[in-house]
């Protein structure tokens, strides 16, 4: 159709020339000048796509600018515009920022992957395996990570229908609190054959001879929930991690045997292995509790709270067949319990500390005939805010120094006999790092007050009459450990006092935590098993070779007089070994066993010129001794000895003549 250019836009109306009237290819782009036909000049459907050849090219090469939303004059864009418009769109990936989904096909390694924030998160590899957190999945769904998978949770009633076709379903049953799965056409628990231990149990109580430890049960999971527990107590040697079973110790509690109150037990540890079982056949692996080191009772600073009694034997020089038991009341109360007691001099002749930490005393008593039966006066001057009293010691031949030990290990003292004004010696802050463990007191009728023993293994001398504590060679109110390096002081007793009005300390016997005793001071008043050493660092002389001594007592008499005819005697001591045998020495180079009995629970604790009492390992029994002789056993009628520990306390605190033998009888 030539000369079409002569037909102007608008010269044809709708339907004048139909597409069917124009042969294919009859009109080309060259026959239509630029601008001769616009979209506004062609009626709708005047020319359809079927009648425009694939290779029609519009002149003018429209740009991306002319294709803007505000310029719709051109309806067909060029290839350049299309390429610019699609920009980052490719045929195998989609990208938005640093997130992308991509299909990769490199032959046999075709795969699909998804990235978020620049890191690959999911991949489907050529054989259909899906990996999350891994690009090399090894099974149908391979998840790599440290989190978890949340499976469906529901009750037993909410289970999906189980069938052989559903084998392999996995869910958590909130009714039984167990994982379960469809196995062989039905749901079954996936709980392990062994119960799972979630947390171990613990030990409560003190690991001291005579005390009871309790093992709490571990927390377990799995099984049918009907749990029961079995127990096996074990012990390990000092420094060892290898535990062995204690024969017969198969309950949740263990009473620590008195056989552990020996040097061999130092550093040994106890534990309990607990095994759980359910109502079926599932069990747990035995799980050990925490460990507790055995506390060897070389020295206790207080006794178990109980009533205070005085015991008077029917004979002071030979075998004892009976004794008189008299209760000592506290301010008229026959039910008030005490934890320690002491002998002193006026105004405090005899006193005791109650279980609530108060000190009561009497200022009148005769040395040899009568004995107080009530302690009526409360020493309020000894009391400190926020603290309770544990022990009091004082000299017995003068009117001066008294020392008070408080519950936190601090020490105060007084030499004011009017209102008991006290002065700080070992402060609360000092006690926080090195508390005083116990006080050791004077021997009867001594002007010396004694001293203290501290947690770090040192000892201290206290002042006595005329600001003097004797010539044992030490410096007052100063820490010292005269024992060999590495050995701690556990107890101290006097073995002699001076023959003068002051009657000060002349020699000491010291118990070390190595199970032997050491001598210091004036050799004329010291035990004769060794030449006495000095009360300086490392200066003591070893006075035994047993290695198993757990208690000591000193200067309780020689011959017919309690300390020699002129009070200048001494050289006397007892030792208690862990095998419950008692030994004695006086002016001898060796230790001699007292009788043949093997049931001594304590040394004597009275500086009597006659019979002195010990406790027996046999319940409710007192053993009477005089010097190196066994004078018989007598049964106690006023109480139950079963609550007493293996070592009742500082022997040197509780002394006097034979009618001053007191013990505390607990419930």
Image (cartoon, rainbow, N blue to C red):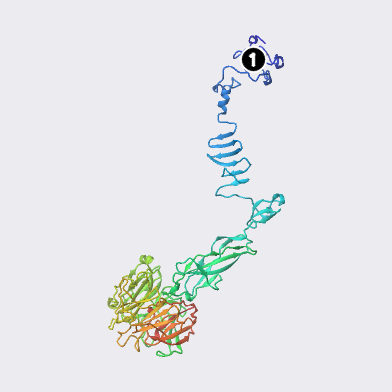
Q: Farthest front residue?
A: 108
Nearer to me, 219 or 536: 536
Q: Residue at x 35, y 66 (%)?
A: 430
The residue to which callout 1 is attached is 28
Residue 397, above or below 54? below
Residue 151, above or below 622? above
In the image, taking residue 498 as reference, residue 622 lies left or right, namely right
Quarter of the picture containing the N terminus is top right
Nearer to me, 313 or 30: 30
Question: Quadrant of the rendered structure where residue 5 is?
Answer: top right
Question: Quadrant of the rendered structure where residue 231 is?
Answer: bottom right
Nearer to me, 34 or 131: 131
Label 1 SS = loop
Residue 347 visible, this orientation? no
Residue 404, above or below 67? below
Nearer to me, 260 or 612: 260
Q: What percent of the width, then of the height, locates residue 103?
A: 60, 36
Question: Quadrant of the rendered structure where residue 506 is?
Answer: bottom left
In the image, taking residue 644 as reference, residue 475 lies left or right, namely left
Residue 385 visible, this orientation? yes
Q: What percent of the width, then of the height, locates residue 140?
A: 63, 45
Q: What percent of the width, then of the height, locates residue 654?
A: 39, 80
Q: What percent of the width, then of the height, locates residue 462?
A: 32, 74
Task: Count the marks.
Answer: 1
In the image, taking residue 97 as reference, residue 435 lies left or right, namely left
């Amino acid at each position: 159709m030539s000369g079409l250019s002569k037909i102007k836009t608008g010269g044809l109306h709708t339907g004048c020339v139909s597409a069917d009237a124009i042969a294919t290819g009859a009109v080309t782009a060259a026959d239509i000048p630029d601008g001769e036909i616009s979209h506004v000049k062609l009626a709708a459907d005047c020319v359809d796509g079927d009648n425009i050849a694939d290779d029609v090219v519009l002149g003018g090469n429209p740009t991306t600018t002319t294709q803007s939303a505000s310029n719709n004059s051109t309806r067909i864009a060029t290839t350049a515009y299309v390429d610019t418009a699609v920009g980052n769109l490719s045929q195998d990936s989609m990208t938005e920022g640093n997130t992308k989904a991509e299909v990769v096909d490199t032959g046999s390694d075709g795969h699909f992957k998804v990235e978020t924030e620049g890191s690959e998160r999911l991949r489907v590899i050529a054989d259909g395996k899906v990996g999350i957190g891994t690009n090399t999945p090894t099974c149908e769904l391979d998840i790599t990570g440290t989190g978890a998978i949340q499976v469906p949770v529901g009750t037993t009633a909410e289970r999906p229908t189980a069938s052989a076709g559903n084998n392999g379903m996995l869910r958590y049953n909130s009714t039984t609190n167990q994982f379960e799965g469809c196995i062989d056409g039905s749901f079954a628990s996936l709980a392990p054959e062994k119960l799972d231990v979630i947390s171990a149990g613990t030990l409560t109580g003190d690991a001291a001879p005579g005390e009871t430890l309790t093992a709490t049960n571990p927390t377990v999971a799995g099984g049918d929930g009907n749990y029961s527990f079995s127990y096996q107590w074990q012990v390990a040697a000092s420094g060892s991690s290898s535990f062995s079973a204690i024969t017969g110790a198969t309950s949740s509690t263990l009473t620590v045997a008195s056989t552990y109150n020996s040097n061999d037990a130092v550093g040994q540890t106890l534990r309990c292995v607990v095994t759980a079982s359910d109502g079926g056949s599932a069990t747990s692996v035995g799980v050990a509790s925490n460990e507790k080191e055995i506390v060897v009772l070389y020295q206790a600073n207080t006794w178990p709270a109980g009533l205070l009694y005085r015991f008077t034997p029917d004979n002071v020089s030979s075998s004892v067949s009976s004794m008189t038991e008299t209760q000592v009341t506290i301010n008229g109360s026959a039910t008030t319990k005490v934890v320690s007691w002491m002998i002193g001099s006026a105004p405090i002749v005899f006193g005791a500390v109650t279980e609530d930490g108060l000190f009561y005393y009497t200022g009148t008593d005769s040395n040899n005939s009568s004995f107080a039966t009530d302690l009526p006066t409360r020493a309020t001057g000894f009391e400190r805010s926020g603290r309770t009293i544990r022990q009091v010691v004082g000299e017995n031949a003068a009117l001066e120094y008294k020392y008070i030990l408080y519950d936190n290990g601090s020490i105060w003292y007084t030499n004011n006999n009017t209102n008991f004004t006290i002065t700080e010696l070992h402060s609360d802050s000092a006690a926080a790092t090195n508390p005083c463990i116990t006080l050791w007191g004077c021997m009867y009728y001594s002007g010396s007050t004694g001293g203290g023993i501290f947690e770090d293994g040192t000892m201290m001398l206290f002042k006595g009459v005329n600001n003097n504590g004797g010539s044992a060679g030490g410096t007052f109110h100063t820490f010292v450990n005269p024992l060999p390096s590495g050995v701690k002081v556990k107890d101290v007793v006097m073995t002699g006092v001076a023959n003068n009005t002051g009657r000060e300390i002349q020699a000491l016997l010291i118990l070390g935590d190595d199970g032997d005793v050491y001598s210091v001071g004036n050799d004329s008043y010291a035990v004769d098993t060794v030449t006495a050493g000095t009360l300086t660092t490392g200066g003591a002389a070893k006075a035994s070779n047993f290695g198993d001594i757990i208690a000591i007592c000193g200067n309780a008499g020689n011959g017919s007089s309690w300390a020699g005819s002129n009070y200048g005697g001494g050289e006397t001591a007892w030792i208690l070994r862990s095998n419950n045998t008692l030994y004695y020495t006086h002016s001898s180079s060796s230790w001699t066993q007292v009788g043949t009995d093997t049931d001594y629970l304590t040394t004597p604790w009275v500086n009597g010129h006659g019979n002195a009492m010990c406790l027996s390992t046999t319940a409710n029994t007192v053993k009477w001794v005089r010097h190196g002789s066994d004078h018989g056993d007598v049964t106690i009628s006023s109480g139950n000895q079963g609550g007493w520990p293996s070592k009742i306390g500082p022997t040197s605190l509780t002394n006097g003549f034979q009618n001053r033998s007191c013990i505390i009888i607990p419930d």
